[in-house]
Image (cartoon, rainbow, N blue to C red):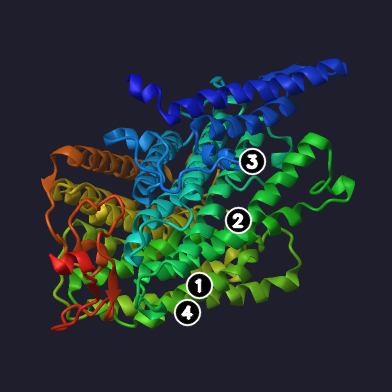
């Protein structure tokens, strides 16, 4: 325990607390000197909390030591060129590491932790909705300065954003761990920046959770003004948390792009790259170029609250619709940030388990780029009911429907790949198939919602909630679990338990489809989203009870996965050699990977997915003069 409490993580948390007090104390002292109020309902005033939270992030980053090398450089001291691991075992994951594999695991563990927290929030408000009338989130309840309905709004809103941040971290985990291995690189292009990208996400998550105890907020995950302009101080923590997490996304995307462009193995031309690399590039382009917009939109509301600016206040000449344009210009392409890596995982794993070449490799690669590009011109379909100029509706409707074309290319390629293949169904393949089906349901329910006439009726109903969950589970959650089961032996040298893996699958998958289909059904019948109660005369009680049971079954499945995951690290069956018979380069060397990945460089001499073709070879390791002499 002593080593844990002296780790970089605990140092960072301690200094974040100190930084928050320093920043808040500074504002409080200035306000006292000016004769202004220095306390409010949550002890500090809102300006004090905001500057305190900002200082807390800065102190956290310095306190962990992740900025130490840059500080040395600024002082004229040359930092070490290579950063050797100082820690072993579990200590690596709570301290600073520049190894992309360790950082990938750090991202994965943090993502799983946030999924559990966000899922817990969902179970709480899902239980409240199991029957009509208020059950336990009543007006008599008082917690964190909120009564029951207010707490419901906060939990519902935080569930959305915490899950989004967890997805971003899960995507970063897969890309950080796998991309350098696939490219034949020793590490990412900028290892220090890579570590910084992960560690800044930690205080971001803490700020999001702080919003719960500082009065919460009632805006949903979107933070629309005017509600967000007058919500409690928890709203500012929400804004700052998302703003900080955005830095992680932007810097990570920059690192991925440079790594892919500059560090590919000899012979790895663009169309010999693994398909997951194409997905990572498309994702990173979106993250690098669009994330600033959500940060800007939230920052403008922060300034409106702090300084009285009128960006979105019609009384001061502002326009609340402007916020939605800025917000959705990122937040719809962000959907593709979530799903493109997942679709890349599906395309990567499918040929392994059907023992056939990936059909239409170039079309799948280009479809990822097309989805990324078209995704930038569809944002306003979220605004058909917002009061946006009517003449903009039809162009955005057509651009939204156009996204179905490159998405359809992937589906047809997957079907052609599966056709007449020698299919095996270990746990990773089961989650790949579930991802295809769930994303298909999300895809089929999307175009009707993209048409103006239908969206005007369904926009704020549970139909949209069901559609979105299908898209996210199919595009990220199921592929993420597939990736964890697939690359777990590479990371640990052991396999996860297949029986528990399949139990996880067969509990989660049917329960998930019951959940989303039920959401769509009651949405079509008029059930509104983001409400704490509903009229019993609507007859939704039985359906909501079924949905709640399904949600708890999904939670049980995740608990089984977590037990399997952590237990298998030490007790899992040893995984020797190429356990999946994959052509990918990381599976051609022993597991777990050596510190610097490949002792011998390799050259790409063939196509990446020529499974089942006699004599074909993707990579060939180059023998050094020393090994050749021996």
Q: Sequence-wise, which precedes: disc 2 or disc 1? A: 2
Q: Are marks 3 and 1 in contact (CB under 8 Å)?
A: no
Q: Sequence-wise, which precedes: disc 2 or disc 3? A: 3
Percent across and percent down for residue 185 are 36, 62
| Badge 1 element | helix
Residue drawn at point x = 75 percent, y = 46 percent: 300
The residue at which mark 4 appears reads as 405
The residue at which mark 3 appears reads as 239
Left or right: residue 391 versus residue 376 is right
In the rendered image, the quadrant that contains the N terminus is: top left
How many numbered discs, if any? 4
Give the CA distance from mark 3 to mark 1.
Answer: 28 Å
Q: Sequence-wise, which precedes: disc 2 or disc 4? A: 2
Camera-nearest label, 4 or 1: 1
Q: Residues within 10 Å of mark 3 (few under 14, many from 20)?
A: many
Give the CA distance from mark 4 to mark 1.
Answer: 9 Å
Q: Which mark is residue 73?
A: none
Q: Residues within 10 Å of mark 2 (few under 14, many from 20)?
A: many
The residue at which mark 1 appears reads as 371
Say above or below: 606 vs 488.
Answer: below
The residue at which mark 2 appears reads as 291
Percent across and percent down for residue 63 are 53, 29
| Badge 2 element | helix
Q: Residues within 10 Å of mark 4 (few under 14, many from 20)?
A: few
């Amino acid at each position: 325990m002593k080593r844990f409490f002296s780790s970089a993580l605990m140092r960072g948390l301690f200094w974040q607390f100190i930084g928050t007090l320093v920043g808040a104390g500074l504002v409080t002292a200035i306000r006292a000197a000016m004769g202004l109020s220095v306390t409010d309902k949550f002890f500090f005033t809102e300006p004090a909390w905001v500057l305190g939270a900002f200082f807390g992030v800065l102190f956290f980053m310095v306190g962990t030591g992740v900025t130490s090398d840059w500080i040395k450089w600024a002082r004229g001291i040359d930092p070490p060129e290579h950063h050797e691991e100082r820690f072993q075992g579990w200590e690596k994951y709570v301290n600073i590491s520049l190894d992309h594999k360790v950082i990938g695991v750090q991202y994965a563990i943090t993502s799983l932790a946030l999924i559990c927290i966000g899922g817990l929030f969902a179970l709480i408000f899902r239980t409240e909705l199991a029957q009509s009338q208020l059950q336990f989130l009543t007006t008599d309840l008082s917690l964190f300065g909120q009564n029951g309905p207010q707490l419901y709004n906060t939990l519902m809103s935080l569930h959305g954003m915490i899950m989004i941040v967890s997805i971003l971290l899960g995507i970063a985990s897969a890309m950080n761990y796998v991309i350098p291995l696939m490219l034949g690189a020793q590490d990412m292009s900028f290892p220090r920046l890579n570590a910084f990208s992960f560690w800044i996400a930690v205080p971001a998550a803490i700020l999001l959770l702080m919003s719960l105890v500082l009065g919460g907020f009632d805006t949903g995950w979107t933070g629309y003004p005017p509600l967000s302009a007058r919500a409690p101080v928890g709203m500012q923590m929400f804004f700052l948390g998302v703003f900080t997490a955005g830095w992680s996304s932007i810097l990570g995307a920059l690192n991925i792009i440079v790594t892919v462009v500059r560090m590919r193995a000899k012979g790895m031309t663009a169309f010999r790259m693994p398909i997951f690399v194409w997905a990572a590039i498309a994702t990173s382009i979106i993250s690098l170029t669009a994330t600033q917009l959500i940060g800007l939109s939230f920052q403008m509301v922060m300034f409106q609250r702090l300084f009285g600016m009128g960006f979105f206040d019609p009384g001061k000449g502002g326009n609340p619709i402007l916020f939605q344009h800025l917000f959705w210009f990122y937040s719809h392409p962000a959907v593709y940030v979530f799903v493109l890596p997942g679709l890349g995982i599906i395309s990567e794993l499918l040929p392994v388990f059907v023992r056939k070449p990936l059909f239409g490799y170039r079309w799948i690669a280009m479809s990822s780029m097309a989805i990324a590009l078209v995704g930038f011109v569809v944002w306003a379909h979220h605004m058909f009911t917002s009061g946006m100029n009517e003449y903009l509706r039809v162009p955005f409707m057509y651009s939204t429907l156009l996204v179905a074309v490159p998405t359809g290319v992937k589906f047809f390629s997957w079907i052609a790949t599966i056709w007449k293949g020698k299919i095996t169904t270990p746990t990773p393949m089961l989650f790949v198939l579930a991802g295809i089906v769930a994303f298909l349901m999300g895809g089929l329910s999307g175009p009707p919602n993209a048409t103006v006439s239908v969206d005007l009726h369904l926009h704020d109903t549970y139909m949209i909630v069901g559609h979105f969950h299908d898209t996210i589970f199919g595009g990220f959650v199921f592929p993420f679990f597939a990736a964890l089961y697939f690359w777990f032996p590479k990371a640990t040298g052991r396999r996860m338990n297949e029986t528990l893996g399949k139990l996880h699958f067969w509990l989660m998958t049917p329960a998930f489809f019951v959940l989303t289909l039920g959401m769509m059904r009651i949405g079509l019948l008029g059930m509104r989203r983001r409400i704490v109660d509903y009229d019993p005369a609507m007859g939704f009680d039985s359906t909501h009870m079924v949905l709640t049971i399904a949600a708890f079954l999904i939670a049980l499945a995740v608990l089984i996965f977590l037990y399997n995951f952590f237990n298998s690290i030490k007790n899992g069956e040893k995984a020797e050699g190429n356990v999946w018979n994959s052509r990918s380069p990381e599976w051609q060397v022993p597991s777990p990977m050596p510190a610097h990945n490949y002792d011998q460089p390799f050259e790409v001499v063939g196509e990446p997915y020529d499974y089942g073709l006699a004599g074909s070879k993707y990579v060939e390791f180059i023998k050094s003069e020393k090994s050749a002499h021996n």
